[in-house]
Amino acid sequence: MTFAQTIRLLTILLIVSANVAAVAQDTLLLKNAKIYDVMNGRLADQTASVLISGNRILSITTDPAVRADTTIDLQGRVVLPGLIDLHSHLLLHPYNETVWDDQVLKESLELRTIRGTVAANQTLAAGFTSVRDLGTEGAGFADVALRDAIEKGIIPGPRVFTATKALVTTGGYGPMGFDPRWEIPVAAQTADGIAECRKATREQIAAGADWIKIYADYRRRSGDPATPTFSQNEINAIVDEARSANIPVAAHATTDEAIQRCIAAGVKTIEHGYDASLDTLQLMREKGVVLCPTLSASESISIYQGWDPQNEPDPPRIQKAKQLIKNALACGVTIACGSDVGVFAHGENSRELELMFAYGMSIEDVLRSATVTAANVLGQNNLGQVTPKYIADLIVVNDNPVNNLFTLQEPVIVIQNGQVAFNYLNPNTVAEATPPSSSQVVEETIQLGSNKKLGELIRKLDMVSPNIKTEQGTAPPQQERPSTDSKDDAEARFQFQLNADGSYSLKDVPITRGDLARFIARQIGDGVTAAEVTIPTSINQQRLKETEDWLNRLGVKTVKFVGNLPN
């Protein structure tokens, strides 16, 4: 064989091997699934199978002969697109844990970034497969690092669209209220005048911003009402500069004047928008500007300030939020899911959807707001639907969300980019691998909970089958479930603790409300529908009622409180 023939043969072999690699992608089949159609707002009457190849939905079929490398029998559970939150802050944590000023001024960048990796994992575990992170709040370009680490598979988390530092004017953002002799760091990038606004926009885009965020209004001094900050010309310059790089702009804006300036300049979304007039909302509709109302942040801040939603009338902040939704619906404004999570606990993003529904949106529009509507805002025409050729970002829930919106608190499977990120279902009943051929052995991998401590708890509580391999190795032998057979009631129960500050614990390990909901879903799936809740000494009757109602909505039939019960 001549040298030329040898080269030709090697070239042919390389082409053939490349083609084989291109088609030999791992496939996943979700069979016996009921698919929720977000566009038409209805759940399919019949079950079907979703075939995923690589990171794409290959087909939706009723053909029972379809096979895949891995098959999961959903037994009639509901498949929806992965949820999208358009207003998150992965570099913040709840203000009732540490006030915003102290997070910005006292917590190191390293600590905040490490905490951000945990927040990203909690977000994904809650079924939110994409987020738009609207500002690092003093943490520089750490959101770009989180985005890139997730994309490279270094850490788990949602698909992140970054806004980096955000833009503010001098005296137009916090921290504030300090002795003016001291130069206090600002939790965003300051830009004044057209030239500085263009320069700062360029700098943030060069550093990795997928969006530019501006604070179009803010209070000038502690305790003052918000007023517009950037001038019309400054906002125009920012939007024009971003547009040159095909980068959209989001605006924090609560006052009517600031919102009008942003609409005129061509921003894509208004964040908050509480004081928008009817005329301004009409203009938003005409110009196609989308509203992200951040209702759950308003609720959380009101509660942090002492509001008892069960026993007290709505404070002005909540009244404005409710009126905003009513007015926006009347004007036909497009409303998208943007929660401002970080103000409250990561993993609790679905609270925004519950409040949208409670404040007057139809449940079909609520579900669209966190799927196809949010995908459109992001310019992602391959996200937000369970449709062939779309990216396989999917969640599986137990119930039809149209009938039970709270089912979104507890996704039992989360699939991101075609890979099973979390599987909370009992593998004994739902994991069914395709029979192996002579050239293929299928092994179902079950990931544990949304963080290491929860994963350890899941193992202890026998939530993983002993014959299924986990990422950490083979699960330990099956143990007796630690239910509580009491003298007066032999009914099997699962246990958790309600803490004095309103948080929760499992086996003395803190757990978020979302993770607890998923734990409860697993228990109910195993037939354990009774709960035993250990309560602190200082708790009122209303808190107990709220907890019992929440558990009932999740499907818990019997709730027993243990401790010093209030009179």
Image: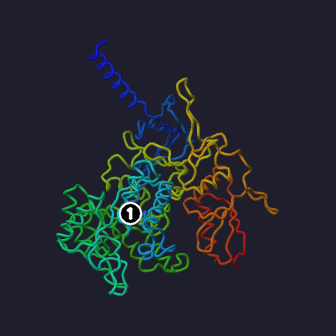
Left or right: where 549 falls relative to 336 = right
Q: Quadrant of residue 247?
A: bottom left
Q: Position of residue 37 (x, y in %)?
A: 42, 47
Q: Quadrant of residue 269?
A: bottom left
Left or right: where 121 falls relative to 484 = left
Q: Is residue 24 above or below residue 214?
A: above
Determine the secondary structure under disc 1.
Answer: strand
- The front one of 123 and 286 is 123
Q: Which residue is drawn at the image coordinates 37% and 85% (left, top)?
A: 178
Quarter containing the C terminus: bottom right
Name the colouring of the figure: rainbow
- The front one of 310 and 129 is 129
Residue found at the far right of this picture: 487
Q: Position of residue 396 (x, y in %)?
A: 51, 48
Q: Which residue is drawn at the image coordinates 21% and 63% (left, top)?
A: 239
Q: Which residue has dot 1 on it?
A: 87
Q: Position of residue 186 (x, y in %)?
A: 34, 75
- The front one of 460 and 275 is 460
Mark 1 crowd level (few <14, some 14–19, many ≥20, 10 Å Cα): many
Q: Is residue 529 above or below residue 465?
A: below
Marker count (numbered): 1
